[in-house]
Amino acid sequence: MKRLVSGNEGIFRGAIRAGATYFAGYPISPTSEILQQAALHSEEYPNFQFLQAEDEIAAAIATISASLAGAKAFTATSGPGFSLMQETIGWGHVVEAPCVFVNSMRVGPSTGMPTQPAQGDLLQIKAGSAGDYYPIAFYPSSVEECFRLTITAFNAAEESLSPVILLADAFLSHLYELVELESIEVKVVPRIKEPLGKGQRLFTGTAHDKMGNVRTNDPKIYQDWLWELKARHQRVAEAYPLFQYLPCRGSDVLLIAFGITSRIILSLKERFSIFRPIRIFPVLEKELKEVSQRYRHMMVVEGSDGQYAGWAEWATGRKAIRVPCLGGGFKLQWIERQIEERLKEERT
Amino acid sequence: MIDRSYKELLKMRRYPHTWCPGCGIGAVLKNVAMVLKEFGWSYQNTVAASGIGCSGRMSGYMNLDAVHTPHGRALTSAETIKAVRPELNVIVLSGDGDLASIGGNHLLHTARRNPVITVFCNDNEIYGLTGGQAGPTTPKGTKTLTSLRGEIYSPLRLGRILTTQAPYFYARTTVYHLNHFKHCIREALLWKGFSFVDIVSDCIELNGRRLGFRTAYQMFKWFDERFHIIEGERDHLREDELGIAKAEAEALPKPVEEKEVKPEVKKEDLKPYTSEELQRFDGNEGRPIYFAYKGTIYDISTSPLFQGEKRMRCHIGGRDLTQDLEIAPHGEDLIFKFPVVGRLV
């Protein structure tokens, strides 16, 4: 039966379907509902554990530790909380803990505009923690996709043995749509990694060799480890080349948008071609290159000052015209006018 | 013959270890391993967690599945592992800087949530791994690399912080008083809740020498002078005492519901009023306000709703209000609260 479900609930239901048995979080707009859902769910199902931590640092540590202990774990936060979690995300990549971090973006930096949507955490996701790591991130644009991609995120986490980021925005989190989640068929990857408590392994954030021995002065061991990590993430990401491409006959402009922005500009599909990357990181390099070369102009409409546009330029080697929707100002008419003005500038 | 079977719990293949000669961590590691062996805890049922620092390296030398967390986060990690896998024994091996400074918030909140984990805090009063900077437990006046004229702040008193709210288990011991140390480890591991063993330890190379000690043994003798062991159970420890302070959870006081018992008065004994007499009590000229309900007359003068008003919406004093209840937003209970003064005849 179809019923009204919010983006936050879609994410939570997706996690439960993927087999999640642990949630840790700290209240923050706009993902507090996920924390509340977890509290409610743990009342009904005693094998579902839930922790309202003292801060996002503890919530992130609890998520990774629960994963090491054998549970499929996830946490949900927004930009400011995600900043606090960065330290732990780096640790999660080193100790190879599969889990999911949900980041529903709001206007930043700092506290910013807590109830307004934005898409400004992309660079934070890519490189918020110290050193080199290769995070995988997905970004849905509807409630049903929130459900599906949460499961995809859990699967990618199990395969890549690392924290996977599920992006959303304040708009999507509180978007209610009529969906029937129960009948959706999904593939769930089970846990393969051996949980804590039976071996003599060391899960350390310090550089280490394959035996888990700390090795902090050997560049060779570090390089081998990093290339292996990169290759594994690349391999897993390639199994999920998720995007949506809506070509429009006669258009020489390609609009690139994702998340809620792609929903808003969908009504322009009769005039412009639209490309919606669903896998945000690693960037869809091959797909972007292939699609964009059919068009004279490539425009990126996004809720930040060109965070994805920079990546699109890097991937395609050509100029991306930027249409930033800042401070929660996602208005179709405004976006349409901006697109026309930028095109006029470009064509003269 | 000396029993060396505790070495099963140590990763001897990784020796020699990274710690300086004379460091107290060796004693901590050995004694914890000895008691774990005594209890029959092994890699089959035990997990160790630690943070960053010299002391944070301890878990890596234990022959257990060990989690080496980012700086300060060992407690949250241990708590979560225990929550997800209650059948495992979880111990935390870490230092004072890690647990009390960068992990101070987690210390407060994990202690509050009271998971069944045991924390061994190698309290050497200094940041050793980074070269000897002042830590949260560095005594006032101590000269370190970052307190050149002597530490100006008072140290954090873990014993006081952790014993503010029952249940708690806080033990203070030193690496010199070995029998007492082992006794504390045993008691802590048996405690069903959050237990914290504060082990006063020495850092001879990066703290002791600056203080004027020439050998680790001189520091141990200093511990012997500074502290004395106390016997028996205690609620709190003074700063110069070694011992165990513990308290069970207090039973929550149950809220007492007080019911007012009104003496039953027979209706026949009440003073009879006719409806004409009742009408006089309408609140005018200082007279009280009465009304009748199902043959009984109540005094409503004390009601805040009638104060100075003489009437409350459609209710008029001095009348029989039995019919009014049907349209009133309240039930009979409200009426029975008022004092009974007579009966309607």
Image: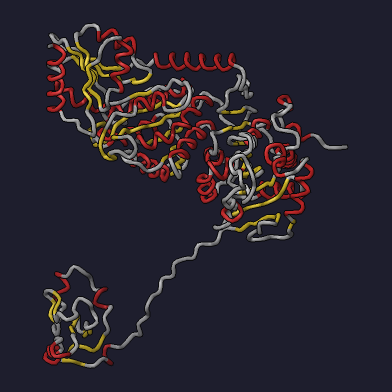
Front-most of residues A137 and B227: B227
Residue A194 spot, x, y in % from top left:
56, 26
Q: Give the colouring mode of the picture.
A: secondary structure
Quadrant for residue B326, please give it.
bottom left
Left or right: A146 as drawn, with respect to B255 = left
Front residue of A83/B86: it is A83
User: B130 above or below B168?
Assistant: above
**In this rendering, would A32 be left or right of B61?**
left
Q: Please tell me which residue is depicted at 20% across the width and 14% down the height of the picture.
A: A254
Q: Position of residue B5 (x, y in %)?
A: 79, 34
Q: Quadrant of the C terminus of chain B?
A: bottom left
Q: Is residue A177 above or below residue A138?
A: below
The residue shown at (32%, 41%) is A29
Seen as rendered, the residue at the extreme right is B1
Q: Position of residue A343 (x, y in %)?
A: 14, 16
Judging depth in this view, the residue of A101 and B145 nearest the camera is: B145
Q: Is residue B86 left or right of residue B42?
A: left
Q: Quadrant of residue B273?
A: bottom left
Q: Is residue B46 visible?
A: no
